Image (spheres, rainbow, N blue to C red):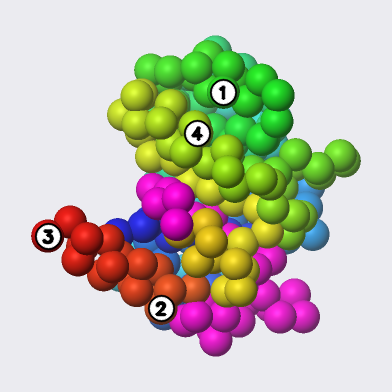
Amino acid sequence: MVRLKYCGNRSADDVQIALASGADYLGFIFAESKRNVSPEEVRRWLASAPLGGKQLVGVFVNAAAEQIAAVAAAVPLHIIQCHGRETPAELQAVKEVTGLPAWKAIHHGSGALDAMRQYAGIVDGYVVDSRVAGAWGGTGVSFDWEAVPRYLEEAARQGVPCFIAGGITPDNVERLLAYRPTGIDISSGIETDGRKDPAKMKQIEAKIKQCSQETAWEGR
């Protein structure tokens, strides 16, 4: 089954909708973004909301390890996602100070595979996103998915999952699923007027379920 992450939750309603969804992970952005949230807000939204087995991912961009640790002390995060220019040494420091697994975002383009190889043995997962000038993510822009198999192959060689992000919607997710990614990371593609949309989530999940059933049938 494809792992599913709904990112950019920025209100109590978003959190309730995401918790009621079929997602495996809920992402919160603790960095400069239109979807930026504070640890206090997230803690309040989660106070009376059982996770039901879902894991929380904190997204940071070029933040110091101590800053990330302070957020992790306030919010029950399960995973740290570093979405900027963090070096392998900085990722290792984040893991040591938080005691949590860390994912690294890689922006598609020339040198992206070489970048992944630098983090081998350090990171616990990858998120491959589009490269858009002036933005780290959440742009709603997809990259050329014909490159997806190369990223999946490198992540598999390292023994970690690889999520694909950027411009994924109910209308195009089937095309991405054809490449059989280990995970999908969606933010703007499950929103309507800036709010998480349960109808779009259900469409995404139905197509993932259908793809998984077809894959299982092919494997017989």
Q: Which mark is residue 206?
A: 2
The span shown in magenta is 178-203
List the residue tagged with mark 4.
151
Contact between labelled residues 4 and 1, with CB atoms less than 8 Å apart: yes
Q: Which callout, 2 or 3, points to the residue nearer the camera?
A: 3
Q: Quadrant of residue 104?
A: top right
Which mark sits nearer the N-terminus, 3 or 1? 1
Horizontally, residue 49 falls left or right of residue 42, namely left
List the residue tagged with mark 3.
220
For the C terminus, the quadrant is bottom left
Residue 34: horizontal and vertical position, in percent? 79, 59
| Residue type, label 3 | Arg
Between 55 and 176, the one lying in front of the other is 176
Which mark sits nearer the N-terminus, 1 or 2? 1
Label 2 to label 4: alpha-carbon separation: 25 Å
Residue 149: horizontal and vertical position, in percent? 47, 38
Disc 2 is placed on an element classified as helix
